């Protein structure tokens, strides 16, 4: 931002205002703080500010329109977050920005306003510096940097170099894919030029979109493997082609291509990989859970992702021997969408779940006992601010009470609920392996007495449709004697525990 | 008592099994893998050890003698924990070749083990016994001290030795520790010590937190009686496990405990008969019974609960209580079992029950002027003899009287001395 204030204050100001506008709208829409913190609102808002900035000049009207456009982007982001991210686990990328900018620019076009973004250097020396550098570099290299600077919708080699350096600092892998995307798109353009002419000005857009696609799919949203790299470059090539072909019709309407092809191709690919029709994991293509998207280097170190509930090996989410208080299709609360769930409690040798008459939650044996992760994954949601009920009261408002949701795969989430107040030991984004401590059993939510609720479900939303599944490698006890069950469904009244290994003993 | 005599130790199999199950349950709900090593020195009656082994306990021994007892019961070497300051070379050699867990108490022992390891040509997995100051507890005569750096020194010594491999840490806080928070502090210190060993490439297989858990008895200077003061196993587990999980490096090592009295004290009661009743000059009544400090040495620690057993027709229910001193049969002034116990009026032949005497009383008992009594096991109404009462034959077995000292009755005429 400071760079722009330096070179063109109006662009800088409108970018900042755009970010602010979008974020304020998010607050007004009561979006959760965690989501606003991710920066998606500011990003889309400031991008709108950037693209419309050059038209602002001294025009206050333009400034207001820009701000309105940024707010619109914020609203579209809000809607898309629900439809794409929560329901389908897909990132929103910069789709809101594209839609919102097109709306504004289309309007401006039909009002006969100027629609070509331009670079205005307020200082003379900056212009000379720019051309000096541009002369030194070969055409291709300068094209590469200029296209990088299109991230900010400016056409400047200096900006591109700065952007590239920052990119390399963040992730070398992304820097690599930026270059690879560039090369792929140059190749594709040359290929197209053999058959038909390519307009001037297309190159930069095509290269830009290609770089974008390559970086997104090359390790950032898809775990880096050889297959993912090949897919990324293929997609980049396709993106280049799309850019070339839609450039003309779009420009006729006064609309810049922006990064529409990049968004389109990336979302299409991610949608296919994450969906259930194509078994992408068999091809070595694993999408990265959204909460973990930070850099390809980090994503590579995440635990294995399962894509089908049949692959996942679930261990019981506790230590020691517990009893099933309500199993699948239980008639208390495990019916309909929530059929495939379990409630676990601890009983004593007399079959009671509490000391005495169980007046307090603390009297129950399982209250406060550790809860552990049933399978490797990433923690995607955590809630720990619900108070524990005093038995037998229930909290029907916050049905699930304190809970932890772990993502094991694109459509596979474990939900554990009714934890103790402030009794959660993990954070959103943390990767866990089987056996990691998640928190303490409690009595929050719709819970008459302390118990642990577990279900495997399809989406990240609380209480979404449960998936029938089995636990692997556990003991079922009959009269104190345990039988090993390789894969099974614990039923009401079963005493179960995970397999315990004691070195050198007869267990 | 009619069949087995008086006094009589009575062991309850169900109580023993129940205490073990409770302890195991408390910890297994809070920690992924645990093992309980029964502390033999508390009471190494074969039947008691066998019951606990059936429940899954390891054997924790502090001497070659106890090691042999474990062996004789069929316990394999890899289920024996060998602690203690005195480990003779032959005993160590046997323990090492059988794969027992050896917890090193001193540098001298360390050197000895290395020597043996060299002779046997194998690397021995060992643990170091540590001690530390936790609250008021600061036993520093066993093992290596944590605070003054000895423990780290010893760890280095083991790590750098080609014959030894550091696989565990052993700590034993004290005895009859009534405050679970002291265990929490110990757990914290142990865990951070374990963490500091990571940089030396050591991944611990197990952590042995020893014993010291209180049983349902009341110490002499303890204000609150056992019912209020003795922590439950859940409370000990709540103090220890979360701290360990939070501070130990992954993967979490096996957690071993070495309870003694917590398992066995409440499982054994003593039945004893009243010998005589007397009035002291102070007006205080005294009752002499046939079990004294020879059999109940731990009266020095506890105020045992003493109850009158109601046999048909002997003591009527609802009778008034009077405060009596209980004396044993030994001809020694120190043989007082308890002062001022509230009991119904007693007569010779009445039976008293002394409760929760399982820990140390038998193993520390003496043969002072009375052979040791029989011990029976009750299990769902069935009574089985698990130790025969000692008799003259048994006691005379080890005596060797030189021929010249044989008793000859005095001759009719006195012998002149010159």
Image (cartoon, coloured by chain):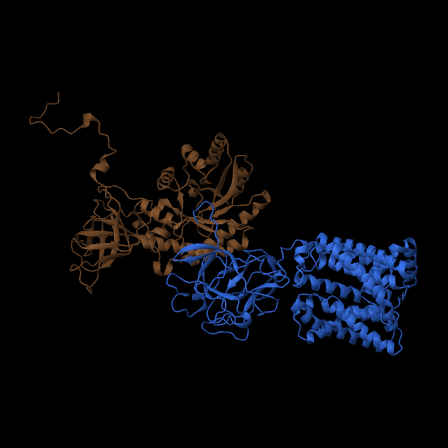
Whether residue A178 is visible = yes
Q: Nearer the viewer, residue A35 or B314?
A: A35
| Horizontal side, residue A317 vs residue B38: left or right | right
Task: Please give the name of the residue rendered at 78% of the width and 53% of the height, measured from the top-left corner.
Answer: A176
| Horizontal side, residue B130 vs residue A186: left or right | left
User: Which color was chain A given?
Assistant: blue
Residue B169 lies, with reference to residue A97, above or below; the image says above
Measured from the top left, where is residue B379 in percent x and y? 29, 53
Q: In which image quadrant can residue A147 be found? A: bottom right
Residue B196 lies, with reference to residue B221, above or below; the image says above
Q: Nearer the viewer, residue A190 or A51?
A: A190
For the view shown, which residue lies furthest in the top direction? B418
For the view shown, which residue lies furthest in the left direction? B412
Of the 4 image quadrants, the one containing the N terminus of chain A is: bottom right
Measured from the top left, where is residue B125 in percent x and y? 50, 39
Q: Nearer the viewer, residue B33 or B224?
A: B33
Whether residue A149 is visible = no
Residue B334 lies, with reference to residue A64, above or below; the image says above
| Horizontal side, residue B78 vs residue A198: left or right | left
| Horizontal side, residue B139 vs residue B346: left or right | right
Measured from the top left, where is residue A461 in percent x and y? 61, 69
Measured from the top left, where is residue B106 in percent x and y? 46, 38
Count numbered badges in the picture: 0
Chain identifier, brown in the render: B
């Amino acid at each position: 931002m400071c760079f722009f204030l330096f070179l063109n204050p109006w662009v800088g100001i409108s970018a900042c205002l755009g970010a602010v506008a979008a974020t304020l709208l998010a607050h007004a829409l009561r979006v959760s703080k965690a989501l606003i913190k991710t920066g998606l609102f500011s990003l889309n808002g400031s991008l709108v500010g950037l693209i419309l900035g050059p038209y602002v000049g001294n025009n206050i009207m333009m400034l207001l329109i820009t701000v309105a456009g940024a707010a619109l982007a914020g609203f579209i982001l809000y809607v898309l977050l629900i439809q794409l991210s929560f329901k389908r686990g897909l990132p929103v990328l910069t789709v809101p920005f594209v839609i919102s900018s097109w709306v504004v620019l289309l309007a401006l076009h039909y009002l006969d306003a100027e629609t070509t973004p331009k670079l205005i250097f307020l200082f003379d020396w900056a212009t000379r510096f720019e051309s000096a550098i541009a002369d030194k570099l070969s055409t291709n290299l300068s094209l590469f940097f200029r296209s990088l600077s299109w991230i900010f919708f400016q056409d400047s080699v200096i900006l591109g170099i700065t952007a590239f350096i920052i990119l390399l600092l963040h992730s070398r892998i992304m820097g690599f894919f930026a270059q690879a995307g560039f090369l792929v798109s140059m190749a594709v353009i040359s290929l197209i030029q053999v058959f038909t002419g390519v307009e001037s000005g297309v190159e930069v857009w095509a290269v830009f979109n290609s770089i974008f696609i390559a970086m997104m799919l090359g390790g950032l949203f898809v775990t880096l493997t050889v297959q993912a790299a090949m897919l990324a470059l293929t997609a980049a090539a396709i993106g280049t082609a799309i850019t070339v072909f839609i450039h003309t019709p779009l420009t006729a309407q006064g609309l810049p291509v922006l990064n529409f092809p990049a968004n389109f191709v990336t979302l299409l690919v991610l949608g296919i990989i994450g969906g259930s029709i194509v078994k992408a994991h068999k091809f070595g293509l694993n999408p990265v859970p959204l909460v973990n998207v930070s850099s390809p280097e980090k994503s590579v170190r995440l635990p294995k992702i399962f894509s089908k509930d049949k692959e996942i090996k679930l261990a019981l989410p506790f230590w020691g021997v517990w009893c099933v208080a309500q199993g699948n299709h239980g008639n208390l609360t495990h019916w309909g969408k929530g059929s495939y769930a379990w409630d676990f409690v601890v009983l004593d040798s007399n079959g009671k779940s509490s000391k005495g008459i169980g007046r307090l939650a603390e009297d129950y044996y399982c209250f406060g006992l550790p809860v552990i992760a049933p399978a490797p994954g990433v923690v995607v949601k955590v809630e720990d601010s619900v108070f524990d009920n005093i038995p037998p009261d229930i909290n029907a408002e916050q049905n699930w009470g304190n809970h932890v949701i772990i993502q094991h795969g694109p459509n596979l989430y474990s939900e554990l609920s009714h934890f103790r107040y402030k009794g959660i030991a993990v954070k959103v984004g943390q990767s866990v392996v089987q056996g990691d401590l998640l928190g303490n059993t409690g009595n929050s939510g719709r819970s008459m007495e302390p118990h642990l609720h577990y279900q495997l479900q399809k989406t990240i939303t609380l209480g979404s449709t449960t998936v029938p599944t089995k636990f692997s490698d556990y003991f079922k006890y009959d009269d104190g004697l345990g039988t090993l069950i390789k894969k099974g469904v614990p039923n009401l009244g079963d005493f179960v525990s995970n397999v315990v290994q004691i070195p050198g003993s007869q267990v | 008592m009619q069949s087995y005599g008086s006094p009589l130790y009575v062991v309850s199999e169900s109580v023993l099994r129940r205490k073990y199950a409770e302890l195991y349950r408390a910890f297994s709900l809070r920690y992924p893998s645990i093992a309980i090593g029964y502390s033999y020195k508390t009471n190494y009656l074969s039947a008691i050890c066998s019951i606990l082994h059936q429940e899954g306990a390891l054997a924790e021994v502090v001497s070659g003698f106890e090691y042999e007892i474990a062996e004789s019961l069929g316990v394999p070497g890899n289920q024996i924990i060998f602690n203690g300051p005195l480990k003779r070379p032959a005993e160590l050699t046997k323990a090492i070749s059988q794969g027992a867990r050896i917890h090193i108490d001193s540098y001298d022992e360390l050197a000895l083990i290395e020597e043996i390891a060299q002779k046997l040509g194998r690397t021995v997995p060992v643990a170091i016994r540590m001690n530390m100051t936790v609250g008021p507890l600061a036993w520093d005569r066993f093992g290596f001290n944590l605070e003054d750096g000895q423990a780290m020194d010893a760890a280095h010594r083991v790590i750098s030795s080609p014959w030894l491999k550091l696989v565990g840490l052993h700590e034993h806080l004290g005895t009859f520790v009534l405050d679970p928070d002291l265990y929490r502090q110990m757990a914290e210190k142990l865990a951070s010590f374990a963490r500091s060993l990571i940089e030396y490439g050591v991944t611990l297989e197990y952590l042995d937190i020893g014993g010291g858990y209180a049983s349902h008895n009341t110490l002499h200077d303890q204000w609150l009686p056992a019912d209020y003061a003795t922590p439950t196993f859940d409370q000990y587990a709540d103090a220890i496990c979360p701290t360990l999980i939070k501070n130990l490096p992954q993967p979490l090592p096996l957690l071993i405990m070495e309870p003694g009295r917590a398992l066995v004290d409440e499982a054994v009661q003593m039945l004893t008969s009243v010998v005589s009743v007397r009035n002291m000059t102070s007006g205080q009544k005294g009752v002499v019974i046939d079990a004294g400090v020879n059999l109940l040495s731990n009266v020095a620690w506890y105020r045992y609960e003493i109850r009158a057993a109601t046999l048909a027709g002997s003591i009527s229910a609802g009778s008034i209580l009077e405060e009596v001193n209980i004396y044993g049969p030994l001809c020694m002034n120190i043989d007082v079992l308890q002062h001022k116990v509230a009991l119904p009026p007693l007569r010779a032949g009445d039976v008293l029950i002394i409760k929760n005497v399982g820990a140390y009383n038998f193993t520390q008992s003496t043969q002072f002027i009375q052979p040791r009594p029989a011990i029976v096991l009750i299990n769902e109404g069935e009574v089985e003899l698990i130790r025969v009462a000692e008799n003259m034959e048994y006691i005379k077995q080890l005596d060797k009287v030189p021929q010249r000292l044989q008793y000859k009755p005095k001759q009719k005429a006195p012998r002149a001395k010159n």
